[in-house]
Image (cartoon, helix red, strand yellow):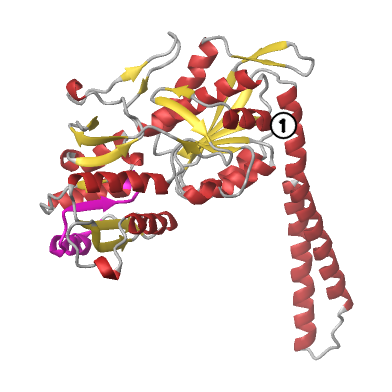
Amino acid sequence: MDKFIYAVYLVVTTIGLTIGLRLLWSLARGEKLRFRPLMGFLAIIGLIAGYYFWERQDVYDRLAQQRLAQGLDPVSPVHIAGVWPADDPDFFEGLRAAVAAINADGGVTVRDDSGADVTVTLNLIEFPQNDEDETTYLDVAEDRRILAVVGHRGESEAIRASAAYEEAGLLYLAPTVSRPNFSEHGFRRVLRLVPDDDDIANHIADFVNDRGYRNIVALTPRTEAGKNMARYLSSVFRVDNSTRNRVDIPRITLYRSYEDGARHFHELVTDVEEADHSVILIADDVTGTARLVRALRSRNVDAPIVGFPIIEVDTFFEIAGDLSNGVVIPSLLPVGGDPDTNGAKTRITGPATAPGIDVGDFVEVQAYESVMLLSNAWERAGTIEAGATAAILRAVKGWKGLHGSYDFTPDGDITDRAVQLKQSRNGRFHPIAE
């Protein structure tokens, strides 16, 4: 339908340019202007635009109805979509491992419209993105084969995608999105698998207090997520005028933001060196955190550095290199990374046909867990219909995963997720002894 609309739009635009040039020619020659062709042209434009927006509005309703029918009367294979940047292949490795393990184990057993048992296998449709991709979610929403989606690393993108997926009748699991307003829209078929930033900030505050750090440097990128995290950190370390001179409570002595995607931090590091600080908090993604850690350690800034769970991936060590040691994070992978393995990767394997996954890689584990959780929910619900599956996920407590259990709130948030402090050493994050 879009191609037809675009073709008509091209024809109308050509006609419009012709009429416009004719009017200009008449004006230049002093001839009497004829507005009837122009009014006719504007009427055509109005009709085309109205039809286009009506069609766009209606298409998601039809997709939702079609997916409802597919969910109630499933046909194998069931297609799920994985959406993630192409420069982070570990995510797709986790998805593939889960799909392979489920299919090797015989698939997922649900019931069809008549109540009879039906066993379906899974098929993964991958949507690797580049830096310019901002509308991949529209392609996913309009792909009639897809019944569930896992992914979206960018938080703003994930929020836009959630609205499209909800309207198009898709079940959406966001494995790494921690921004609190992701779950504020009341969508029934949207869930996330990590605690929100406010919760993570509180865990960091507990660590800072327990270690007796009093002077804090907070560094964030100039993004919406970075600004939000700065606000959360400021709230948990807030010091009002009456306590400004107290030395027995933590306070942010320096807050600096920097351009998103920055590669050089010379002035920023100088500011940190000159500031009164006992710990440095970096609230950025894996690439930004790794680059900043490297810049700080290269200038012999040896204060403890605290990052966020998202950096527990191989990419952090690949970028930060030999300067990666000593970074602390509140890890969402509590049992990964045995300190006695000297940094060796720990992997788990499913059936013989299923590849192993690295249980110390946050993104890979979250991808794997998402598909396993989805499969488990389908079997418990007895259906792959998105609304019923989401309701089951919210209602049943104690979903078992690789690193503990998952409990969801009515808003689709996760609660009581186990968190363990870890510190980087020899290319891995290892638990810190209490």
Q: Amino acid at mark 1?
A: Arg
Q: Position of residue 421 (x, y in %)?
A: 27, 36
Residue corresponding to mark 1: 67
Q: Nearer the viewer, residue 248 or 172?
A: 248
- Please state, as top left, top right, bottom left or bottom right, where the N terminus lies in the image: top right
Left or right of residue 1, residue 243 in this image: left
Can residue 127 be spotted in the picture?
A: no
> Which one is in front, 219 or 12?
219
The boundaries of the magenta stretch are: 264-287
Q: Is residue 359 above or below residue 300?
A: above
Quadrant where the C terminus is found in the figure: top left
- Residue sitting at 31 percent across and 25 percent down? 335
Residue 110: x %, y % from top left: 66, 16
Left or right: where 27 falls relative to 395: right
Circle 1: element type = helix
Residue that protrudes farthest toward the left in the picture = 300
Q: Quick check: can you spot residue 265? A: yes
Q: Is the residue marked by circle 1 packed among few (<14), some (14-19), or many (20+) residues within 10 Å?
A: many
Instruction: Work out which residue is located at the far front of the displayed protein and give it.
Output: 242
Name the residue furthest right: 36
Residue at the spot 40% in from the left edge and 29% down from the top edge: 364
Point out residue 411 in the picture as x, y percentages from the top left corner: 57, 42
